Amino acid sequence: MLRNEVSCLHHVNVRERMFVVTVLSQRGGGSLSCPEKNGRFPSPTRCDTYIQCEDGVPEEIVCPDGLLFNAKARYFAYPCQYPVDVDCEGRPGLKERKSTGDCPYQYGYFRLGDSRNCGQFMNCVDGRGYVFDCPEGLAFNQDTYQCDWPDEVESCDAEAFLGFKCPEAAGFFGDEYRFYGHPTDCQKYFICINGRPRLYNCGEGNAFNDDIGGCDGIENVTNWVEIKCIDLAPRPALPLEDPPSSPANTFTNFSSHTDLQRAVRFSQNCEKSTISFFVFACLSLPAWNNSVSNGRIFMKLHI
């Protein structure tokens, strides 16, 4: 199996891929007939089979394992397509499958994981499986072959998948849409729609602001610390005592020990024996060890 990632937005269509296939055919003879002199026509008995007519000579062609004949496909388009795109109009669907170690059919898209792990799927091409990840917070929808909101995927438990349970609504007008900050990552937040969560990301340089119930510049969000340099020796941890008084190195809006979210921004221009980089990280309470003594804040950040 090969692993890939789909890095797109909501309603990611994962079907627009080219593949090389082989077909089985039987030319002329038997009970085959051509409704018209030239064209492609559905088999009266199976949805994965069609009749190709050229100058009145019929040829029965069987689609590759996992694909069905689409009678509505344009003439110059390949007529064997994924089941989600085909209306069999009552004819039997796929024939006996030719499964492999990776794939239930030679061709197709298939959900991986269970109701708590809905974000992966496999694309099977000629019996070989390629594993893909949906964008963060989205689940693979077997009915549409798309990455979708988990609450819209019947086989996915949105709360278990996202690790967040929407609080019970108070019953006021507008409660069908409610916003909550992520418990461990202040760049992310949840929108609860009719009691079911969806995960969103504020993007680089922003964080979820509980005061306004939406994304805001990190400098406007409480409980964040801006630190300039980090000494990497002997390990990536930084004990901070009496931080310098310059604006780039002081604590900003640091409130109580019980706050669940902390955002840390590391700037550049470090001296020797320190690392210089810019990264945005949000940490939960267990990662912090805080105490107050003689009016000073002692803080150790474990990376």
Image (spheres, helix red, strand yellow):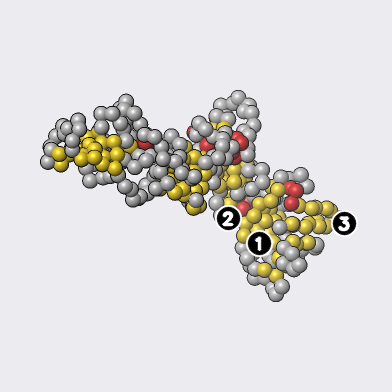
Name which of mark 2 and mark 1 comes first in the sequence.
Answer: 2
Q: Quadrant of residue 258?
A: top right
Secondary element type, mark 3: loop
Mark 2 → mark 3, Cα distance in angstroms: 34 Å
Left or right: 110 with respect to 115?
left
Q: Nearer the viewer, residue 235 or 18?
A: 18
Name which of mark 3 and mark 1 comes first in the sequence.
Answer: 1
Q: Nearer the viewer, residue 153 or 295?
A: 153
Q: Residue furthest right?
A: 294
Q: Residue furthest front?
A: 30
Residue 243 vertical placement versus 198 (above, below): below
Q: Which residue is mark 1?
A: 266
Q: Residue at x 84, y 56 (%)?
A: 295
Q: Position of residue 216 (x, y in %)?
A: 58, 49
Secondary element type, mark 2: loop
Amino acid, disc 3: Asn
Q: Is residue 66 visible?
A: yes
What is the number of the mark on residue 205? 2
Q: Residue at x 64, y 48 (%)?
A: 185
Q: Residue at x 15, y 39 (%)?
A: 57
Amino acid, disc 1: Phe
Q: Residues within 10 Å of mark 2 (few under 14, many from 20)?
A: few
What is the number of the mark on residue 3? none
Name which of mark 2 and mark 3 comes first in the sequence.
Answer: 2
Q: Which residue is mark 3?
A: 294
